[in-house]
Amino acid sequence: MTQHPETQYLNLLKNLLEFGDIRVDRTSVGTKALFGCSMRFNLEDGFPIITTKRIFWKTAFKEMLWMLSGGRNIRELLQQNVRIWTDWPLKNYRTLTGSSISQEDFESRILSDDSFALKWGDLGPVYGAQWRSWRGHDGRSIDQIAELLEGLKNNPTSRRLLFEGWNVSDLDEMALPPCHKTYQFFVSPNSGKLSGALMQRSADAYLGLGWNIANLALLIHLLAQQTGLEPGEAIWFGCDVHLYMNHVDQAKTQIERTPKPLPKLEISRKPDSLFDYRIEDLELIGYDPHPHISADVAV
């Protein structure tokens, strides 16, 4: 009997619970952590999104499209009702001003006040800024994604089909240094398939990892459509892979659940550019997960 692809993820949670080192982290929440883990998903088997709890895939996909746009301000996300990045600028605002402003009021000001959004909504040169406008030592702005597309189309057997988020000179300016930091791609001339690998320096196994895998798979599908290839494999490597101590009970609940059939990603149109996709173009057909299990983000 063929093993369900999601079993890899459930086994990872089990290993973290059983064998993870207990560590104190920057959030002071504490984690159980392992170093050096991997998973791989054949995209022909279905879209690799977690089914043992609901993943809010539209929110995840909106984040990836925002990153591909080069976005760095939470206002662009809040306009799409995406609040996953608010915690960091809100904490910064409260710390620097002494204000006890609520998240709701903070987000309202970001949306309504241009100057406030510019100052307090900016996350610094995070993911999208590095992907689309990496600052070179000579002052150039390097669009890594555009260069990747050019390579996939014109030099598909290159070993340099990658992009990177860990810009050492910019780390201090970022609200959060990149966790999913290095993406690399591989084209098989025989099959015409595009595979992609992601290396994460830091992986929040319970809350973030399901999103990371889904967004990697989405990116492979979009790149494949734009370059006339077929999706191959999504391969994930994690270095510091951790389960926050306030997610232990949720993980125990999740691993008792049986995975359901994976959905299929349907892309309704092929825009002229990778950067012109909209959330309305994307649909997960047949996604019928187990109920959501809520958990707090460690900031």
Image (cartoon, rainbow, N blue to C red):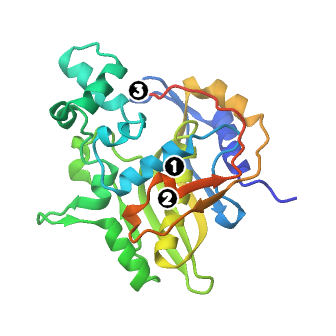
Location of residue 71 with respect to 140 vertically, above or below = above
The quadrant holding residue 151 is bottom left
> Real-space Cα distance between discs 1 and 2?
9 Å
Horizontal side, residue 240 vs residue 191: left or right: left
Q: CA distance from mark 2 to mark 3?
A: 24 Å
Tell me the mark number nearer the camera, choosing from 1 and 2.
Answer: 1
- Image height check: is 293 above or below 276? above
Indicate which label's residue lies in the foreground, 3 or 1.
1
For the point 42% across and 46% down, which residue is it? 179
Residue receiving disc 3: 27
Looking at the rendered structure, the kind of residue marked 1 is Asn
Q: Is residue 166 visible?
A: no
> Which-is-in-front pick, marks 2 and 3?
2
Identify the residue shown where x is 56% and y is 62%: 267
The CA distance from mark 3 to mark 1 is 20 Å
Q: Residue furthest right?
A: 1
- Mark positioned earlier in the residue sequence (2 or 3): 3
Helix or strand or loop: what does disc 3 sit on? Answer: loop
Depth order, front residue of 12/197? 197
Q: Earlier in the sequence, mark 1 or mark 2?
A: 2
Q: Measuring from the top left, give residue 134's x and y in whole percent.
A: 24, 60
User: Callout 3, which amino acid?
Assistant: Thr
Secondary structure category for the residue under label 2: strand
Q: Which residue is mark 1?
A: 212
Up/down of 37 relative to 148, above or below? above
Discs 1, 2 touching: Cβ within 8 Å: yes
| Between 142 and 244, the one nearer to me in the picture | 142
Give the amino acid type for the residue marked by disc 2 in the picture.
Leu
Q: Pinpoint residue 282: horizontal percent, then vertical percent.
A: 54, 56
Q: In which quadrant will I find the N terminus? A: bottom right
Judge by depth and name the residue closer to the eye, 270 or 14: 270
Q: In the rendered image, which residue does mark 2 sit on?
A: 198
